[in-house]
Amino acid sequence: MSNVEIPIKPEFKDKSIRTFVIRAGRMTDGQRNAFAKAWPTYGLSLFSGAQDWPQQFQREAPLVVEVGFGMGDSLLTMCQQEPDKNFVGIEVHPPGIGRIINNARENNVDNLRVYMADANDVLTDCFRDNSISRFQLYFPDPWHKKKHNKRRIVQPEFLKLICAKLKPGGVCHFATDWQPYAEQMLELLTADPGLVNNAENSGYHPKPDFRPNTKFEKRGENLGHGVWDLVFIKPE
């Protein structure tokens, strides 16, 4: 298929500091067509406000939210491996969104919904407090330069927001292959009074079975990169 220009932009409010960059890219015809065919089923708008998730999915089920799912392969795998859960993905890059909703449609996956918007905006406006059973953030942009560290999504205010949205007993799961970011995450998570480390040694957690290996992760492992998982619980 020939490539076409991206016609779709993410939704976001005015904000001075962004935790992401809208990367230049092109969508395949299949990804573009997915928006016409699959977005009405899978896509949600930031501006629709707080969702009634049992009504949205037409069932009561634990709600799993992932921010920054990239091309969506691991998130789709989780949807298929955990059909007893409802999944919501938040991403800003149209090619990945087109890919995941197209693959979800082709595989008759019905426990997935997607936002193309800023994660902070979506979490603030579209989820009620105490509504999320598991929150996932895998391999976020580490913003390597010290002067850019303020753009990292994991900050005290972000953790405060996640904690408010998690149900009592809910799980907060982060993963990164950048050790300085892992150390910062661990420090900030440990300092948050609303979350408790689920690792036996109060450090990093073994990779949970529910998190599939991503292509990005496999490539890093081949290069000798480490991966750090952090699992924290909101006490009941």
Image: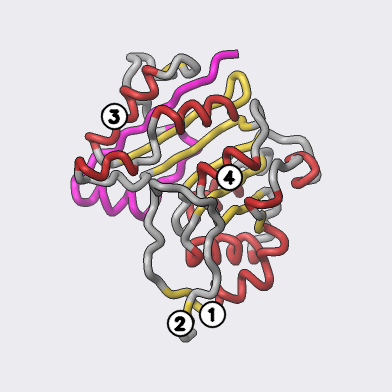
CB under 8 Å between callouts 1 and 2?
Answer: yes
The residue lying toward the viewer, choosing from 206 and 139, is 139
Q: What residue type is labelled 2?
A: Asn
CA–CA distance between discs 2 and 4? 30 Å
- Report the span colored magenta: 208-236
Q: Name the residue under label 3.
A: 184
Give the residue drawn at x 40%, y 49%: 18
Q: Which amino acid does label 3 sit on?
A: Gln
Disc 3 is placed on an element classified as helix
Q: Mark 1 points at which residue?
A: 29
Q: Is residue 136 left or right of residue 170?
A: left
The residue mark sitting in front, 3 or 4, is 4
Q: What residue type is labelled 4?
A: Val
- Looking at the picture, the colour scheme in use is secondary structure
Q: Is residue 47 left or right of residue 59?
A: left
Q: Name the residue under label 4.
A: 122
